[in-house]
Image (cartoon, coloured by chain):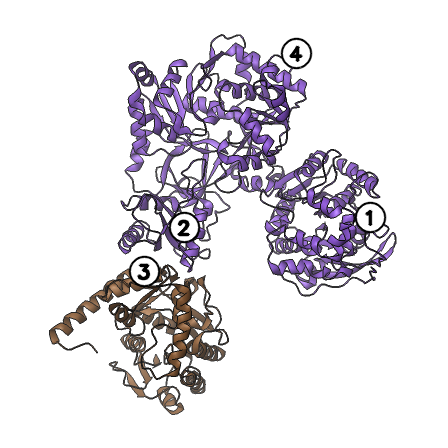
Amino acid sequence: MIFPARPAQAPPKLPEWDPAWSRIVEAKTPDGPHSFHVLDTLAVLRAEGFEPSGTILALHGNPTWSYLWRHLAQATMDAARSGGRVWRLIAPDQLDMGFSERLAHESLPTPHGAEVRRMSQRIDDFDAVVTSLLAEVAGSSALDDAVASADHPIVTIGHDWGGVLSLGWAARNTDLVSASISLNTAVHQPEDAPIPAPLRATLAGPMLPTATVVTDGFLRVTMSLGDLTPEIKDAFRSPYENASQRHGIGGFVADIPVDENHPSYSELQRVGADIAAYEHPALLVWGPKDPVFLERYLRDLRQRLPQADVHRFELGSHLVSEDYDVSGVVTDWLKTQFPVGDAGADAASGTTAAENATAADPARGVTAILDARHDDESIASVDFAQNPAQQITWRHLWHVTTSIAGGLLELGVRPGDRVSMLVPPGNNLTAALYACLKIGAVAVVADAGLGPKGMTRATTSADPQWIIGELPGLGLARAFNWPGRRISVSPLGPVQAKLFKVETSLTALSRTTHHAQLPTPAATDDAAILFTSGSTGPAKGVRYTHGDISALAAVLTRVFDVHEGTGLVAGFPPFALLGPAIGATSVTPDMSVTKPKTLTASAISDAIIAGHSTMVFASPAAYKNVAATASELDEEQKAACARVELVLSAGAPVPLDLMDSIAEVFPNASIHSPYGMTEGLLLTDIDRAGVTAAAATSNLGVCVGRPIDGVELALAVIDDSGSSADTLEQGVEAQGRLGEFVVSAAHIKSGYDNLWATTAASARDDLDGRTWHRTNDIGHIDAEGRVWLEGRLQHVVTTPRGPVGPGGLEALIDSDEQVSRSSIVGIGPTGTQSLVAVLDAEGTDLSPGLAPLDLTSRLRELVAEVLGHDLTAVLVAPTFPTDIRHNSKIDRSRLAAWADHVLSGGSVRTKV
Amino acid sequence: MKITVTGASGLLGSSVARALVAGGHQVTTLQRRPSSVAGVRDVIGSVTDPSSVGEALTGAEAIVHLAAKVSMMGDPSEFEAVNIGGTRTLVDAAVAAGVQRLVHISSPSVAHTGDSIIGEGAGPASPELAHGEYARTKAAGELIALDADSEDFKVLVLRPHLMWGPGDTQLTERVIDRARAGRMPVLGSGAPLVDALFVDNAVEAIVAAVDAVASTHGESLVVTNGQPRPIGELMSRIAIAGGAGVPKLRVPVGPALAAGSVVEKVWDLGEHDDEPPLTRFLAEQLSTAHWFDQRRTQEVLGWTPRVSIEEGLKLLAAHYANEETLSASSRVPRP
């Protein structure tokens, strides 16, 4: 097959593409001049009166072309127009790719053939094109004496093989380049790992030209790795309409160095080494569902670029920038890296919560009290999850944790290594956790309520080097191929150990002789990654430093009087782990953590007796069952419950009737229900009297009380489009308005794990120089400073009469005797949405479809009277989706999609 | 102001004329029958007739153009003559006579292609895409009016959507009559959201437009109550207010669309005074969502609907209760 040469061309008219971005550039590559089609925004910028003060050099992979960067072109244009730094985007189509020159070829490409443009040539091509184009703008030229400066930063970005090529070029031009970004790519193929299956199929000798050149198979498969409309797919395919235009696609695949005999193998080794020496700022944006560029390539890249910020779009695939706002992440990141003027300079560095923590609570290490009590023979922890119940002394706990810490070090665990904990709360988890804390290993905790898929996604994103687990957890890790070397809790037999790839056990490690010196983690070092419930998208890992955990322990002491010697029953996982940090005796009651309803009155009483406890921590679901089983208690158990001074209920608000039931079981306790979230576990608090007082008001929503000592609360007012304001309100200005709650405290998160953009967005406020956290929870603050929750930010309904928080209305509607539960959703475009109530058919005599006229009238009148809003429709849904973990949080997004479908003529029987 | 109202024999036209008189304007009306509105100068004639148009526009400063052939069926040439030709005649005469303002009453169907409309703005009129002769010719008429817009002749187009209320024969009366006869269909779930406009609000919006056109012109505005409702619920409530029971005739959507087309064609062949029971256009209207973004309309007109749907239903119920009482006491059957 003969492939004729053809010079570069301009693309035809394409969607989302400005023809003024296109230019044809002649560049002198080492093998002579070639013509390139280049996306270059310079002409458009200058036409609008902008002169670039920064340049982005972008390189596509195979089989895309510069069309891949059209969103980035648009985003940088928009940024320039809104007064930001003027970034010029230069994105060449590689030779034989896109609309660049087609080289003449005598035959189809093969891995060792002569007809393939090799990696080293492609880096030279890129160099030739960008060097000539950079020279067009003063300040960005490689020929200038003034090399890359803060005045005109030059940043590279690449995707697929364009990622490794652009990183390689950047690493060899560090005097010119200021920073680098890559989307899914691969630098290094580990010898012991197989080539990804889809690629293996394509690479299999004789198939290669057929799959890539003769047919458009490779092209079509790649275009399916993203949610692209047919028009956009066609645009990507437009330069590759027939086989004579597709030689480059095959050539690219043929140039993948699969083994050390491959012509490009040594060049890739060199590029990999150069990248490892690269020290400029870097950003890696990743779609983990990519079937080719797998997690191991991200891991490898992070080892080469330890300075890199990472943002994972958990559900993103290979064409991550087609499905997600990668351009937004890139421009935001560039803004923090290269602020215009001095104003933004400190926004880039940012103060972390850990710094706040150390300022507010002068350091007491998380393990300091445990260390201090190494000779104490009193009880540290009682574990009713074990049969018989196991109690251990402070002295024992100190010895065990110290031994395990030393054993982990000997095994190869390094400070900063991540350890996934698949151990239920109890003495074993306490021992494993504090051993890790002692040496600065980072505990990764994902709730079993996420389900196997959710846990796998969470654990994979945290990428632990180690897993400590009991058998069910290790089985999960094996079945879903989790990363990390395995450690069991109890010793396993040789067959099981081999099956689960377990190297040792906590029991074995606990026999290690003590090391003279363990490494001491700093307050700013990571201590734990705790995963959110994932009720609003994939679960997010929340980063807590040692300073954050110390601060959280300090809150329990300061606000709830948990101190050294206090006995507490820990039926709520996050707090169950803090006992040793505070010096409190913690008792794990006999219950299944993932099923709080399994906690009985009898079990909690036995735990109280065993730990001489005066405090009880659990979730509302657990208390509900405790109250329901209270009649089983004997006199001794009743007396024990009567000794309890503090009952703390966390995880969800406690309705007044439940508070009253709890009070009957614990007659002498004050009952508190703090509000918080994985990112800030204790933010506000309300007690029984507070709930009673709140119930007597006509406020909408659920009252969660006032901020606790040490927590600053502010409100970002929600506008007509449902967005929360950039500015924060406090005091009187914040009262009586619908807004997003924003909090600041020493014990809030330090960030999200591998979610650079999410972290930046959640911590974007700098009021009073503090670090804040946008909670995504919405509601209002009343005139007495009480916080009322009304739902989540993404569920705000934007009617023409203004934004509405769904939570308050739902409570109102649920009070109708014909309704069991409801969800308020918005239908239609932002700012002019219709307010719709969806009712659950289950447990009622309602049938799916439109609600009966009289019920509709009643609810409509109620909403008009209380809120002055028009309730457009009342629908009855056949099923009500809720999240697994709490079985209570209603999935409003799914109900909204169903209601939207039905109210535009779709069938009522459509699956919710 | 001297204002000419065309089509003042219908409910909306006569109500607008009455309201303008009450507002202290000098009102001339043009229609084929006497308007029966007190205090107006009645010109009897048609918008298709240049001489009666000339007479009606004598001295006029503003026009409210309501005259139209409104029907779901009929001879295309009749629609064209009134809705296109009549508008052309009126606009030409108005420009020649130096009239300064035109409030042109159109219909949302001029931009409705059969797909769902969910919270959208007015959208451009499209004779090519509009369904049915009425919509097609109203679209062309609207474009003629907008084409004539200038600083000297300011044109604002209002598109009232699904007007209903006491005295309305187009929708309200039909729904009630058919419900009484057990012939009012509810298509599918009856859940698609539609906007409607209570007649009093329509009148007030048009009156507001006579002022508003002075500052904002050259655009089209859909006018509704801003309270979308499931179509089945709205029809049921109108039927109940009219003393009929809840419509029980449930028809699946697909067959209804097909049946509508067939009925339309069959109806076209013969001579019928009444509308066919179900046209394809109506079937689409009843089975797809069509509700609108009212923010621009309310901003331009400086108007908000005074009568809510709930209040309107009470007024409608009172109207029919009153009518029943009257007809019972006088023993005169309703026409």
- Distance from disc 4 to disc 1, alpha carbons, whole Å, reads 54 Å
* Residue B91 relative to residue A80: left or right: left
- Distance from disc 4 to disc 2, alpha carbons, whole Å, reads 61 Å
- Distance from disc 1 to disc 2, alpha carbons, whole Å, reads 55 Å
Residue at 70% over, 51% down: A53
- Residue carrying label 3: B233
Per the image, label 2 sits on a secondary structure element best described as strand
Q: Are marks 2 and 3 in contact (CB under 8 Å)?
A: no
Dot 1 alpha-carbon crowd within 10 angstroms: few under 14, some 14 to 19, many 20 or more: some
Q: Write down the chain letter for disc 1.
A: A
- Residue carrying label 2: A825
Question: In this orientation, which residue lies closer to the viewer: A228 or B251?
Answer: B251
Residue A540 in picture, x, y percent from top left:
54, 37
- Distance from disc 1 to disc 3, alpha carbons, whole Å, reads 69 Å
- Same chain? Circles 1 and 2: yes
Identify the chain drawn in brown.
Answer: B
Residue A652 in picture, x, y percent from top left:
40, 34
Residue at 32% over, 83% down: B29
Q: Write down the chain letter for disc 2.
A: A
Mark carried by residue A516: 4
